[in-house]
Image (tube, rainbow, N blue to C red):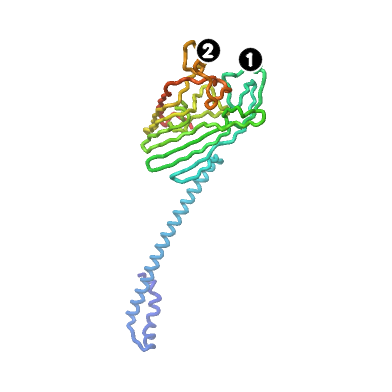
């Protein structure tokens, strides 16, 4: 114990015999001094323990302050890079089940320099050529039929993820809808399918979705079709697409390698005006009768018949994404 801490004790030590004599007791001053020294040492130890506890609490507070400062800085940088975040679809659920509603409302105004008598879907094969009456006529039209509704449901377990998806718009044709008064065009099914994805990378998809021929932007997932950003419902010339019923098996091998096979609804079509004699089974052949109203509207151009198909379409596809050579 430091000598400086004993100064008060030494100062009162001569008074101990006097106090003891006054009280009628005689005590050994050295024994009293030893007891006082022991008490001071115990108090000093308690102070050191309390100081160590205070130091530990201060360290914890400094660590929390540093963490909060780091998170605030990262959040500030994120807002600087992306000042306006895109709105996310409404989602309800938990880690095991989720339900997401999506879609958009579209009001499109179309001004064509050459009249096609068309809505948001272009008639690429009927664009008027020079010298025709429609080539000298412009047309204006407004439509909300390209508005879309979607609903995505997911259920997850330890081994499998089940997905159900519906997507529709109002581009369905109907004899009761017209441009004169009502404009009541019916809801049309775009996609309606279910998917089971297992932990080993194997998945099975059944229902109406984009054909396997359509380009994907991320592997071969059903919701990753590489669609054109165009106002026209017919997309652009050269874009290969179809939406039809199919059964598909997909395998994700990892390292950016995917493979899939699909069995899809067939419809054989030949874009010629006059078919050779004796050719049957195509949509324009003599055996292709006008389909029933529940199958296709006879008022729809090109719906004079459907092909006679004996087997489904079989499609295989392999995707390799090495992670380089692409731009974001």
Give percent across and percent down for residue 71. Answer: 48, 48
Give percent across and percent down for residue 84. Answer: 56, 40
Residue sitting nearer the eye, 44 or 5: 44
The numbered mark at residue 247 is none
Give percent across and percent down for residue 58. Answer: 44, 59
For mark 1, what is the residue? Answer: 130
For mark 2, what is the residue? Answer: 274
- Secondary structure beneath dot 2 equals loop
- Residue 185 falls in which quadrant of the image? top right
Q: Is residue 263 visible?
A: yes
Residue sitting nearer the eye, 115 or 275: 275
Q: CA distance from mark 1 to mark 2?
A: 24 Å
Circles 1 and 2 in contact, beta carbons < 8 Å? no
Query: Quarter of the image containing the N terminus?
Result: bottom left
Outermost residue to the top: 277
Q: Is residue 66 left or right of residue 116?
A: left
């Amino acid at each position: 114990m430091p000598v400086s801490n004993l100064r008060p004790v030494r100062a009162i030590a001569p008074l101990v015999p006097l106090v003891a004599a006054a009280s009628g007791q005689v005590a050994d001053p050295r024994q009293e001094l030893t007891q006082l020294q022991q008490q001071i040492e115990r108090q000093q130890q308690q102070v050191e323990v309390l100081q160590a506890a205070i130091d530990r609490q201060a360290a914890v507070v400094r660590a929390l302050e540093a963490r909060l400062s780091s998170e605030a800085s990262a959040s500030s940088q994120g807002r600087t890079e992306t000042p306006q975040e895109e709105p996310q679809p409404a989602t309800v659920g938990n880690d095991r089940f989720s339900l997401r509603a999506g879609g958009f409302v579209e009001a499109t105004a179309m001004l064509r320099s050459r009249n096609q008598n068309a809505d948001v879907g272009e008639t690429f094969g009927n664009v008027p050529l020079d010298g025709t009456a429609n080539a000298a006529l412009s047309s204006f039209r407004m439509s909300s039929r390209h508005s879309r509704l979607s609903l995505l449901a997911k259920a997850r377990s330890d081994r499998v993820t089940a997905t159900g998806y519906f997507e529709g718009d109002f581009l369905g044709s109907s004899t009761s809808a017209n441009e004169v008064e009502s404009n009541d065009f019916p809801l049309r099914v775009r996609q309606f399918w279910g998917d089971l994805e297992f932990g080993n990378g194997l998945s099975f998809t059944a229902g109406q979705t984009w054909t396997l021929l359509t380009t994907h932007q991320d592997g071969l997932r059903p919701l990753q079709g590489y669609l054109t950003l165009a106002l026209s419902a017919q997309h652009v010339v050269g874009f290969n697409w179809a939406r039809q019923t199919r059964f598909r098996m997909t395998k994700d091998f990892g390292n950016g390698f995917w493979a899939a096979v699909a069995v899809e609804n067939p419809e054989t079509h030949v874009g010629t005006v006059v078919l050779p004699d004796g050719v049957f089974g195509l949509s324009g052949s003599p055996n292709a009768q006008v389909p029933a109203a529940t199958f296709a509207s006879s008022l729809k151009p090109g719906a004079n018949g459907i092909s006679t198909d004996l087997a489904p379409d079989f499609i295989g596809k392999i995707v390799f994404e090495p992670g380089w050579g692409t731009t974001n």
